[in-house]
Amino acid sequence: MIIVGIDPGIAGAICFFSSGNVIDVIDMPTMAEGKKNKKQVNGRQIYNEIMLIKNKFMNEKMSVIVEQVSAMPGQGVTSMFNFGQSFGVIKGICSAMELPIFYVRPAKWKKHFNLINSEKDASRTKVIEMFPRISNKLSRKKDTYFNGKRLNGSRYCNAKFRFSK
């Protein structure tokens, strides 16, 4: 079973698991939009990245875990619209590819890993403990939270839903 874990934000990440092992972790594919070159998710590249893994592991089923996030206090209307658009692009791609989608709230996986009220770097530390082989992919400051939380969220879903081949 291939599990695709997605943090849907512009600064999010996508990770791929097979049999509990990390296949790859990538930053959310983005592209410039409009005259101001604002970032938006690159739906075509998201599709390509998922297809690359799907084709490589043709005989395995694939499921997608998306972090179920919502508006946070202090975020502007435009920011929330852009975030919702990114979330919708990901849902649309997965639906069109006929991939089962599961949603998990951050509080669920954080509780599972005892990360409630912890510093953002605690997610990174937990991931390095579980997957020391990929610690080099978590060396940048932004990796501390985004890829760390995505891997933890996907790992939680892998254990909780007990996906089988």
Image (cartoon, helix red, strand yellow):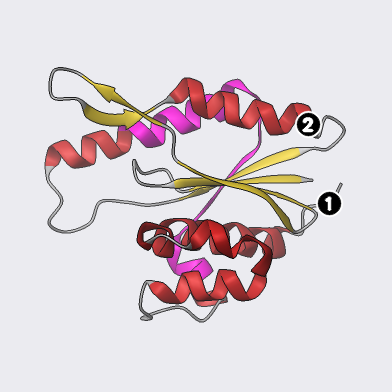
Give the residues in magenta. 85-110
Amino acid marked by disc 1? Ser
Q: Tell me whether the residue at label 1 lies in contact with that at label 2, contact meaning CB atoms closer than 8 angstroms.
A: no
Question: x, y (%) of residue 61?
Answer: 79, 37
Q: Nearer the viewer, residue 138 or 76?
A: 138
Q: Which mark is residue 56?
A: 2
40 is higher (above) or lower (below) than 14: above
Question: Spatial distance from mark 1 to mark 2, Cα to Cα?
Answer: 18 Å
Q: Is residue 87 magenta?
A: yes
- Looking at the rendered structure, the secondary structure element under dot 2 is helix
* The magenta stretch spans residue 162: no
Residue 63 percent location from the top left of the image: 68, 41
Q: Give the numbered dot on residue 119.
A: none
Task: Evaluate whether residue 67 shows in this view.
Answer: yes
Q: Earlier in the sequence, mark 1 or mark 2?
A: 2
Q: Position of residue 49 (x, y in %)?
A: 59, 30
Relative to 60, is 159 above or below? Answer: below
Q: As displayed, is residue 158 above or below residue 53?
A: below
Position of 39 with respect to 20 (left or right) is left
Q: Identify the residue under disc 1.
A: 164
- Residue 17, position in %: x, y? 70, 50
